[in-house]
Amino acid sequence: MPHTVRTHHMLRGAALLLASPLALAASFSGTVASGGKPVAGAMVTAIDAAQDQRDTVYTDAQGRYTLQADFKGPVTLRARAPYFKDDVRPLNLGDGSGAHELDFALTRHSVAAELSASLSASAQLTKLSFPNHDSRSAFISQCNYCHQVGNELTRAVKDESAWAQTMRRMEGYFALLTNKEAKDITTTLAKGFDGKPVAAVQQHPFDPVVARALVKEWVVGDGLSFIHDADVGEDEKLYGVDEGHDVIWELDRTTGKIDQHKLPDSDLPEGGVFAGVQLPIGVFTGKHGPHSMAQARDGRFWFTNALSSTIGSFDPVTKKIKLYDVGRTHLYPHTIRIDQDGIVWFTIVVSNEVGRFDPKTEKFTIVNLPKNGFWRGVTEYAFPYLLKIAAWFPKQNLQMGVSHHKWADLGREAFTFPYGIDVNPVDGSIWYAKLYAHKIGRIDAKTLKVTEWDTPLKGPRRLRFDAQGNLWIPAFDESGLMKFDTKTQRFETFKLPLLAHNEYEVPYALAVHPKTQQVWITSNMSDRMFRFDPKTQDFVSYAMPTRVTWLRDLVFTKDGGICSSSSNLPAYGIEGGRASFICLYPDGEQPQGVVPKAADAPAASIAAPVKVAKK
């Protein structure tokens, strides 16, 4: 079926525009079909001329869509659905007003290599056959840490010697592997990523709920930007910390205007306290490494600086930035949260600590966490000295030759890695997750007493509380979701919905919506975001329109958005080659008063909900 474009500037267009909250925006509507049958759950994306902004909606059961975009001049419209070729259409909007009707015709992939190339990283990884469970577990934990493996950039065909060089470089970036794990992974990648097509067995069932959603993306920086985390301010702007370039990015979602604010200089060398480590070349050019951020009631944002062992405050009104030194033996301040009394709490991953900072007195208190074994205690004591010596030899990775995670054959087990942190809204206690020790812990905010529990699934990462004091925890290593009832001290586990039985996900972070109490979860291997309803125990999957979408902390806006930074490392591995702020509006801004064309043919199911399976 040929595509059609019809532009109306009379009654139908007026109805669309008056019904819309964006009264002057261009409006698009039409259908997505294949062979005369509607394609349900297809994504229709409008891309502005500079390719700086992308707005996306999903088709309903009849393949219909309606999209508004505040763009002018030349734009690109793209229809995309699994197993189909993209249908891309240029259009000139002129002054940006008017209603445009555009029907898309999708053609199924008929060439195996082209179909394979269109599949997510999670599908590509099914080609990897590991020799044992331990090496596969190490690969999931360490090689998917900051980016997808299996996307176009990371599945290149290489021989074993070339993969060995890549592996060595990744270990220099702090992938904690034993020699055997590194060897097994190297061999597996060389054999598995052979350039041959992967079998396409993914299932994409359609959920009509998805058709209400809108996704907006604002491209930021360049191919080497690394916006680790984002937060939404009281002014409803999005702010993001660029860990590689020592920059705070500021996005006005209304105008699309983007500003950047440079952190103050430091007497530290490039790479900060980690100057001896060969951090990602070109990406990490700063000294501080701003990593995580949260806004206090007085309006200031507080953020951790992973590389300089400092935390900072940023006033979004005055743009003033001030830094506070934690102490250079406290290695890699990580995730940050603020309690009801305005006290700033943050994890310190390499040193196995939680930091407490009182903004009124500007005093730090360091909470030493349980060591969880002899060798982890050695790490806590020795690693600051090891990095100090390594810094005498910049970017030479001296620590790899002498660290006990190598010579004692420990790998990641040499570290506990306190990672995510949150505040219990019921009693004000502080809770954290130990990523490599597979534990969660509670700190009494007054006495600083620490209690820990083992988690039933491995890889607890960025956890969050609901309003009732239940702790929700993503299991990064096991494609799972955990709930911990802090009153009964009992766990409940859930499997995340996979696109195929032989795939896996790496849920990095989650957040609980303050009104609905539904849990939103990042997937990161299949370019999706999950919504979990604790009442029905159902998942809904939202496909993301940009390939290689790697999300971090999730935050909620007043206008219904669930927002994050898309920060695959490096950003040039993302489709389009740049990082972005991204917001999903599950009940998106769809125009009212328009009756789309009817379609009697059954839909070709594409989008995605999955009934939860308890583990």
Image (cartoon, helix red, strand yellow):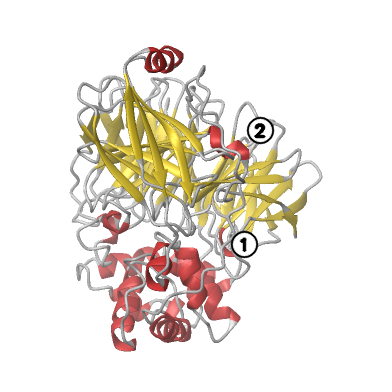
Q: Give amino acid for label 1.
A: His
Q: Which one is nearer the viewer's eye here, 583 or 214?
A: 214
Question: Disc 2 or disc 1, which is closer to the eye?
Answer: 2
Residue 535 in sight here: yes
Q: Measuring from the top left, give residue 429's x and y in whole percent.
A: 64, 37
Tag 1 secondary structure: loop
Relative placement, left or right, of 397 versus 178 is left
Q: How many marks?
A: 2
Sequence order check, earlier mark of 2 and 1: 1
Q: Position of residue 284 (x, y in %)?
A: 24, 56
Label 1 crowd (10 A; few <14 / some 14-19 / many >=20): many
Quadrant in the picture for residue 11: top left
Residue 517 is labelled as 2
Rendered position, 237 above or below 306 = above
Looking at the rendered structure, the kind of residue marked 2 is Gln
Nearer to the camera, 422 or 408: 422
Q: Which residue is mark 1?
A: 438
The percent coordinates of residue 402 (x first, y second) are: 36, 79
Figure quadrant of residue 503: bottom right
Is residue 380 something one can see in this rendering? no
Q: Which structural element holds mark 2? A: loop
